């Protein structure tokens, strides 16, 4: 499973976005995950968010971020 994952360095732009307001309240780590997805999607990456966290999945769907069913 780990071989199928990609690691992303938290570049300054990702950290900056994580600190900006979201349409709904999010927790700190959720903001980092969502900002990372935004970063990759802005660069044309086809990415889906996978999580067991129902709250994070709900926010992702509200932001039109595709989710991967676990």
Image: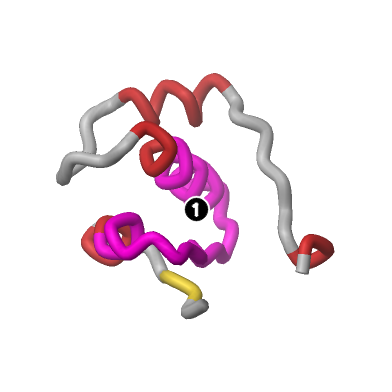
Residue at the right extreme, as displayed: 3
At 38% across and 29% down in the image, what residue appears? 17
How far from the left and from the top, in percent, is residue 56?
34, 56
- Magenta highlight on residue 69: no
Residue at the left extreme, as displayed: 24
How far from the left and from the top, in percent, is residue 43?
56, 48
50 relative to 43, above or below: below
At 34% across and 24% down in the image, what residue appears? 19
How far from the left and from the top, in percent, is residue 22?
22, 39
Q: Crowding at label 1, few (<14), some or many (≥20) Cα neighbours within 10 Å?
A: some
- The colour scheme of the drawn protein is secondary structure
* Number of residue marks: 1
Image position of 16 (left or right of 47): left
- Magenta highlight on residue 44: yes
Q: Quadrant of the N terminus?
A: bottom right
Image position of 11 (left or right of 41): right
6 relative to 22, above or below: below
Image position of 34 (left or right of 47): left
Q: Quadrant of residue 64?
A: bottom left
Q: Which residue is mark 1?
A: 41
Q: Nearer the viewer, residue 67 or 45?
A: 67
Which residues, given as a range, are shown in magenta?
Answer: 32-58
How far from the left and from the top, in percent, is residue 37?
48, 50
- The kind of secondary structure element at disc 1 is helix
At 32% across and 59% down in the image, what residue appears? 60
At 71% across and 46% down in the image, what residue appears? 7
């Amino acid at each position: 499973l780990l071989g199928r994952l990609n690691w992303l360095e938290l570049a300054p732009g990702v950290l900056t976005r994580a600190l900006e307001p979201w349409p709904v309240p999010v927790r700190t780590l959720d903001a980092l995950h969502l900002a990372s997805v935004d970063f990759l999607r802005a660069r044309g990456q086809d990415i889906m968010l996978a999580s067991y966290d129902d709250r994070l999945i709900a926010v992702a769907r509200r932001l039109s971020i595709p989710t991967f069913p676990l």
